[in-house]
Image (tube, rainbow, N blue to C red):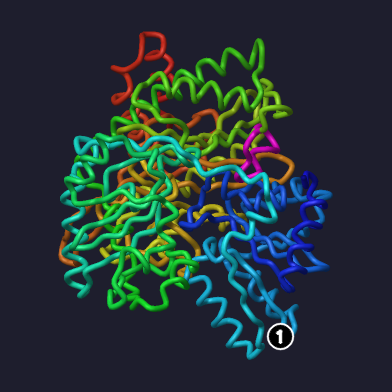
Amino acid sequence: MATTPSQKLSNIRSWMQSEQLDALLIPSSDDHQSEYVADHWQVREWSSGFTGSAGTVVITQDFAGLWTDSRYFLQAETELADSGLELMKQGIPHAPEHVDWLIEHLQAGQTIGFDAAQLSAAQVFALQAAIEKANKPIELLAHSNPWKTIWPERPALPNDPIFVHPARFTGQSAEDKLEQLRIFCQQKGLSTYLLSSLDDIAWLLNLRGTDVDCNPLFYSFFLFSNSGSHLFTKADKVSEELAKELAALDIEVQDYDDIWQLGNRFLAAETIVGYDPGTTPYRLYQSLWSLQWESVGNPMRDWKAIKNVTEINHIRTAMRKDGVALTRLFRWLEKQVQTDPPTEAEVAIRLDELRRAQGAYHGESFSAIVGYQANGAIIHYRPPQKGSARLAPEGLLLLDSGGQYDEGTTDITRTVALGPVTEEQKKHFTLVLKGHIALDRAKFPVGTTGVQLDGFARYALWQERLNYGHGTGHGVGFFLNVHEPPQGFATTITTSRGSTPLKPGMLTSNEPGYYQTGGYGIRTENLIICKEAGDVGFGPFLEFESLTLFPIDRRLIDISMLTKAEIDWINTYHQQVNNELASHLDEEERQWMEAQCAAIG
């Protein structure tokens, strides 16, 4: 059994030789193009040792490299040490720079292999187009589950039960959502639509699962048809009661692996299949050459991005729960750091316990980032259970965390002082806060995109020639994925976060930061909802409202750097936090909260 990175590389290269492959492409995704995946699909992590959520591995007989972006540079340098893999630094998150490398380094007639289910149809189309543009005849060889041979101890697929997320939370029944899809297909001239993305299936059917850590999802495919729909998932995951509820919606449960027999058993040869090439696995597309495919995108992505009134009201409840849990965490931490300082990992565990005590809680929305001092500069740092840093009554702690509640998904970052801080740290904290406030206060015309708004959050830092290497915000699901496209704030229009217009009902993070390698990290994050701002004669405008409820550390603010409008924003926000949380706290907690929310300026 291969246990070390070098042994795994040796085994992979032996398999490549047997298959006459000159290069092997290993993405981070599963068969559904998910960002976070179950252990069964942790192929890139298994082969490289890199645990970040984004990255691509390329292996040849004389080279092995991992491509990832600046969020993970420090982490990757540590985890790839002595692995035999070279860190290849991407300039832009998710940019396919490995494709350019492959085309440059492979010779005409050589071959690139990949798992046909782990790459989407769109990714393979793009790879083929890049090769054709380079006028270099490199052959692509798609394989069906090569890891069955290379990784014999591969974990099994999850088999936990699927459960219903009731319409009293979602504000819309599964029946109504399916009718919405039926009308969409009718408008596109389709009778059939294939859905592969897990969060969209969960949203459409008002179902949730526990197959993926921190994401309430279950592995499945969904085939919608006017003549009867099919949910492809492991049969043991569906109770008799749920099967009856699905049958009432004209949905029949099929085995997960039956999806690969789609053309033989479930669709007639003349069927026109609507699909999204960005999420449909190439293996499925490849196996159905006899069918007619119609690329119509994924309407669920846009539908679920607009939170309805019921969802927004429930999100407010989730934010109050989060605020109470964080209040109890930081009060505990203030005392603990003076007497028996915890480790970073212990802080994460304690916060999870406090969130769970709020009820209707299903776990973290992502593994908590608890970065003390220099670890805070590692943007997606996850403290190890053994060996994480022990806090002390000095310096900065960056805590980025979130929860999954029946009432919604949360994501909040606060940077706090555990003791004395420097004037430089206060300056950098205040620059980040100014950017956060600028984006939160923005008013903008309908049609404005994320790339147009991203600079609001960076402006104060830019004036000091400072910056940060990640996007300013991402969409957030409703008891779904904490990273939910399409909207967000990004520096480039090449991503949906940058190119998507903001619309009322979109829930997005606002999280500028500053990171000093080897020193400390600073980030301030709230979730903001987009809403209408009125029309005074120049067309309709939009604005944001902060839904997150927890104070910003006043000890780190350099008031002399703030405008009156910024001071007013801080005081107004803190008054809102205090008003919303007070009735949910005991007397000592209320006194603590009042002190944290006291007016400045």
Report whether 192 appears left or right of 360: left
Question: Is 303 drawn above or below residue 321 in the view shown?
Answer: below
Does the magenta segment cover residue 379?
yes
The secondary element bearing badge 1 is classed as loop
Q: Position of residue 408 (x, y in %)?
A: 33, 37
Q: Quadrant of the N terminus?
A: top right
Q: What segment carries the magenta color? A: 372-383
Report whether 210 appears left or right of 40: left
Give the residue type that dot 1 points to: Gly
Report whether 324 appears left or right of 156: left
Q: Residue at x 68, y 79 (%)?
A: 103
Residue carrying label 1: 109
Residue 146 in sight from this viewpoint: yes
Residue 439 in sight from this viewpoint: no
> Along the line of sight, which residue is nearer the eye, 92 or 274?
274
Q: Quadrant of the C terminus?
A: top left
Residue 210: image quadrant is: top left
Q: Position of residue 80 (x, y in %)?
A: 76, 50
Residue 234: image quadrant is: top left
Q: Residue furthest bottom?
A: 135
Residue 405: image quadrant is: top left
Report whether 520 appears left or right of 189: right
> Along the line of sight, which residue is nearer the eye, 574 or 501?
501
